[in-house]
């Protein structure tokens, strides 16, 4: 690593001194935060040592993101204090936190889609030329250097809107690193990227750790915890539970601490008697994106779609659902050829589609939970003479959200105020309410905690049991392998193979995915 | 669910939180505050009561009715995340066209001599149709050519005003039949208010309780998510802009029937008053938030202010300056409210 790069020279934050006068680079003491109707944090403490990765674990809605937002100056605690490098600080704004040496990768992407990668990274810190104007050449150079250092291969001048979700996440990561802060917060950075990028991210994290940075890392993935974290703290329902070294506990210990109960079965796959072919896709093509994709799905079958980021998995799903209609190829449902030009066509044919990016294509942020949950069923059902049947809808929406354990004070809370995982549950609920015959799930458990994940998996199994044909895209290899009857692997817009459950393993899938 | 492994109870839905006051309450308080302000100043400066004057209140509410009818349509457009700058010009265009179908046979300046003494609903339908047609063109341009609503409706604003002038070569039209004039003066002169209230109630219900209303909010809140949820955004937006045009046409009918004449310059800047009423009433310009009830109160606030300034004999120039300031303050308050909602409490 080139230590004298201008990228680093640009930073104003202090370099960690050789003799550390403090044991913890970041301390939160007895923080409390209340929102109307919810106590998000109650008397919570957190201590992060420099040069370590400190994981935060806890169920959806436990208060992890809220605590991180307090550290990043976005929320103000109702009580408690924050100590940075041993000194009490008051972080009034996100800018103050940045200047104090705290950088954060948020749970939701916060890039400006119509600006370039470089502009996004250096916003508010753009290099200027002699005339006081933005020096684009230098900005490009700085971005290239940053990317070289992090081994990221992206065009600094590409517009963010052209990038896949995973690549956007890599840009967010690069941006956070570019601050050269003492504390780096990562709120579920791996929820949208595949194993390859995860490995890449971990390399970056190890480099940062060596340089003495204190990293707070939030994840719902247990294996990541053991791979990258030195210490971890567990939260439950806004309370601090415990802090341990990750080397001295087992997976079950952590789950016990997080959930307060035991989860016996991770992938409750059931052998289901397969029915007739429900969906049959032949030579499906979206010009320039993916070509000649063909497969069948039977009633009761779960077809996993695996592949690297950008391999076209999500595009196939979008095309099946009419978001981007196919340019050629045929789709047959129950043996009859159908034309799917819009999502409405797809819904009428009994399909449902949980999209990958809940903020961009999922949530109606200004609306409440019920309105979010009911939006796909009020086309024909639950409508009489154009009026929606509020009372009935209220009942079914409440039922589904209790079944999925959405943590909220009531159904009329704005969805914007829910934690990420709970928003995801509401969106899953939206599509379950439509009673689909064909269910397409793109990263269904993105941002969902272990307990709820097991429940969603068993829910999917249950649906398959009832004869629903399921197509599931997931970047989590254990999820794809654990849940699918067959795995279709994609590489650069082509289907490179379909593996049966019996022969599918990590190595074979990766081989086909990387060719 | 037989495979459920979890044992914890479904106690995730805690008792409802303390109810936050609906936004309308705070806007209503502003309305009362402004009225009280003029009442007090009235006693000190003019020596009479502001509110204790029935005919003044009637004038306020009559003036509010026309803007209010337009604002109900504009509210829906803004909730979809759009804007309609054409309403004032559409008022003039549909007013002029409809007026020529509302004339009496014995009037000296008849525009269409063959079309006189028609029953009242003919000019009314003509006015509504012209308004809806203008709205259709707006919606069609926005959805088919993907130009921003600001530009599409700006074009309509200029063109519709042109049509209004061209239609009679700029000369005003009057001499309406008795039955048509009732639209503005019937029911003991309360007809405009009654029409406004009916429009407000109907669209309040539409926005809150119908699928159409839910889809309108969804499109404004997140168009991409709305598309995936199976909503046909194009056809829905066209409908919303048509409703806005139709209501501008209706407002025009009420206005010309009340003042018994139509002229090409009428409705000038009504679009801005309508947008202001919506924004003051808490409709968010970023889409997805707002209610018809808020807009109604917003229109009342504008009306009370206008009347109050006249009552205090404040110069018209100052009135405009203050009105402009109030609109800006309303938007600032709206942004602040949104920030508060999504950040600290
Ligand atoms: N702005 C807000 N207004 C009201 N309630 C909020 C707000 N932000 C968070 N909450 C509530 O605070 C609690 C904690 O939320 P937080 O986002 O911190 O959870 P989390 O631990 O990050 O969960 P996840 O794993 O799902 O991301 C939740 O119950 C959430 O509904
Ligand atoms: Mg979170």
Image (cartoon, coloured by chain):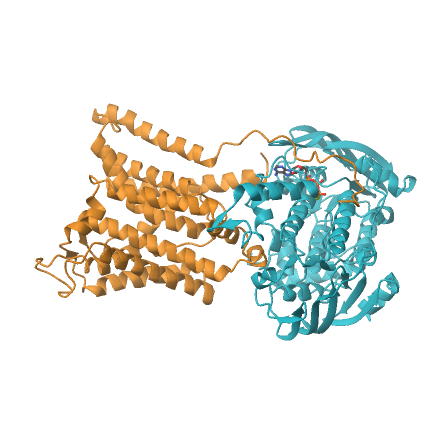
Chain colours: A cyan, B orange
Q: Nearer the viewer, residue A20 or A193?
A: A193
Q: Please count the marks in the image.
A: 0
The residue shown at (42%, 54%) is B83
Ligand 2 found in image quarter: top right
Q: Nearer the viewer, residue A85 or B301?
A: B301
Whether residue A2 is visible here, answered yes or no, is: no
Name the quadrant of the C terminus of chain A: bottom right
| Residue B126: x %, y % from top left | 26, 59
Q: Position of residue B120 (x, y in %)?
A: 21, 54
User: As drawn, is B188 to the left or to the right of A515?
Assistant: left
The image quarter containing residue A39 is top right
| For residue A287, side relative to residue A272 (left or right) | left
Above or below for B279 versus A505: above
Residue A352 seen in this snapshot: yes
Is residue A308 depicted above or below B282 in this figure? below
The quarter in which the N terminus of chain A is drawn is bottom right
Q: Position of residue B254 (x, y in %)?
A: 25, 49
Q: Quadrant of residue B344?
A: top right
Residue nearest the viewer, comparing A73 with B264 = B264
Q: Specify whether B342 is left or right of A276.
A: left
Residue at the right extreme, as displayed: A248
Instruction: Find residue B143 and report its horizontal and vertical position in percent.
Output: 46, 63
| Above or below, A338 relative to B217 | below
Q: Quadrant of residue B226?
A: bottom right
């Amino acid at each position: 690593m080139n230590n004298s790069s201008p990228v680093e020279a640009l930073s104003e934050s202090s370099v960690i001194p050789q003799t550390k006068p403090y044991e913890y680079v970041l301390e939160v003491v007895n923080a409390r935060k209340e929102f109307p109707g919810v106590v998000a944090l109650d008397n919570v403490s957190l201590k992060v040592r420099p040069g370590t990765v400190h994981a935060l674990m806890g169920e959806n809605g436990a208060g992890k993101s809220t605590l991180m937002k307090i550290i990043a100056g976005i929320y103000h605690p109702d009580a408690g204090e924050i100590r940075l490098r041993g000194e009490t600080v008051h972080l009034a704004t996100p800018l103050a936190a940045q200047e104090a040496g705290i950088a954060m990768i948020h749970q939701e992407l916060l890039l400006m889609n119509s600006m370039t990668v470089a502009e996004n990274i250096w916003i508010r810190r753009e290099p200027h030329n002699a005339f006081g104007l933005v020096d684009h050449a230098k900005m490009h150079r700085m971005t290239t250097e940053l990317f070289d250092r992090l081994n990221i291969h992206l065009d600094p001048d590409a517009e963010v809107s052209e990038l896949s979700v995973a690549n956007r996440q890599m840009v967010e990561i690069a941006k956070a690193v570019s601050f050269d802060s003492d504390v780096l917060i990562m709120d579920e950075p791996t929820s949208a990227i595949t194993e390859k990028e995860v490995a890449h991210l971990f390399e970056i994290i190890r480099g940062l750790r060596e340089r003495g940075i204190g990293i707070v890392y939030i994840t719902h993935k247990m294996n990541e915890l053991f791979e990258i974290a030195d210490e971890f703290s567990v939260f439950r329902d806004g309370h601090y539970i415990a802090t341990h070294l990750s080397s001295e506990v087992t997976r079950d210990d952590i789950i016990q601490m997080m959930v307060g109960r035991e989860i016996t079965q991770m992938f409750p796959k059931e052998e289901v008697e397969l029915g007739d072919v429900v969906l049959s896709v032949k030579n499906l093509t979206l010009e320039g994106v993916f070509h000649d994709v063909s497969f069948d799905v039977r009633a009761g079958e779960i077809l996993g779609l695996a592949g690297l980021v950008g391999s076209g998995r999500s595009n196939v799903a979008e095309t099946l659902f009419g978001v981007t209609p196919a340019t050629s190829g045929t789709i047959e449902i129950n043996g009859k050829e159908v034309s799917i030009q819009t999502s409405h066509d797809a819904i009428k044919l009994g399909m449902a589609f949980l999209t990958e990016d809940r903020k961009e294509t999922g949530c109606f942020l200004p609306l409440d939970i019920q309105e979010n949950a009911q939006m796909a069923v009020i086309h024909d059902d639950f409508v009489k003479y154009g009026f929606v049947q509020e009372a009935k809808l209220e009942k079914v929406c409440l039922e589904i959200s209790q079944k999925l354990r959405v943590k909220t004070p009531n159904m009329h809370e704005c969805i914007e105020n829910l934690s990420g995982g709970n928003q995801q549950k509401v969106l899953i609920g939206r599509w379950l309410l439509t009673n689909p015959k064909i269910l397409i799930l793109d990263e269904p458990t993105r941002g969902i905690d272990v307990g709820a994940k097991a429940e969603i998996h068993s829910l999917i199994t249950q649906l398959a049991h009832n004869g629903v044909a399921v197509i599931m895209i997931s970047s989590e290899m254990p999820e794809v392998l654990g849940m699918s009857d067959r795995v279709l692997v994609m590489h650069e817009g082509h289907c490179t193979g379909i593996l049966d459950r019996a022969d599918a393993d990590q190595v074979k899938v990766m081989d086909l995915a990387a060719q | 669910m037989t495979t459920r492994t979890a044992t914890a109870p479904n106690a995730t839905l805690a008792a409802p939180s303390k109810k936050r006051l609906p936004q309308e309450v705070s806007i209503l308080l502003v309305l009362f505050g402004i009225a009280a302000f003029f009442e007090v100043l009235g006693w000190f400066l003019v020596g009479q009561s502001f509110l204790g004057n029935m005919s003044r209140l009637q004038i306020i509410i009559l003036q509010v009715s026309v803007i209010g009818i337009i604002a109900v349509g504009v509210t829906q457009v803004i909730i979809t995340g759009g804007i309609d700058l054409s309403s004032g010009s559409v008022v003039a265009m549909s007013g002029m066209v409809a007026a020529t179908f509302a004339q009496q046979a014995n009037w000296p300046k008849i525009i269409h001599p063959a079309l006189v003494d028609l029953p009242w609903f003919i000019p009314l339908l003509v006015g509504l149709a012209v308004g809806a047609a203008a709205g259709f063109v707006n919606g069609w341009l926005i959805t088919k050519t993907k130009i921003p609503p600001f530009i599409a409706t700006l074009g309509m604003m200029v063109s519709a005003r042109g049509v209004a002038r061209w239609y009679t070569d700029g000369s005003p039209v009057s001499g309406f039949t008795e039955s048509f004039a009732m639209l503005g003066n019937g029911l003991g002169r309360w007809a405009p208010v009654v029409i406004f209230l009916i429009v407000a109630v109907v669209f309040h219900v539409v926005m809150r309780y119908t699928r159409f209303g839910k889809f309108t909010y969804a499109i404004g809140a997140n168009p991409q998510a709305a598309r995936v949820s199976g909503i046909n955004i194009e056809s829905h937006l066209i409908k919303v802009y048509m409703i806005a045009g139709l209501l501008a046409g209706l407002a025009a009918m009420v206005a010309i029937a009340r003042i018994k004449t139509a002229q090409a310059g009428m409705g000038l800047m009504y679009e801005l008053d309508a947008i202001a009423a919506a924004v003051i009433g808490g409709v968010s310009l970023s889409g997805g938030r707002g209610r018809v009830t808020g807009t109604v109160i917003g229109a009342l606030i504008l009306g009370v202010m206008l009347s109050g300034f006249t009552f205090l004999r404040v110069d018209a120039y100052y009135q405009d300056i203050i009105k402009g300031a109030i609109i800006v303050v309303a938007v600032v308050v709206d942004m602040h409210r949104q920030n508060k909602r999504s950040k600290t409490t």
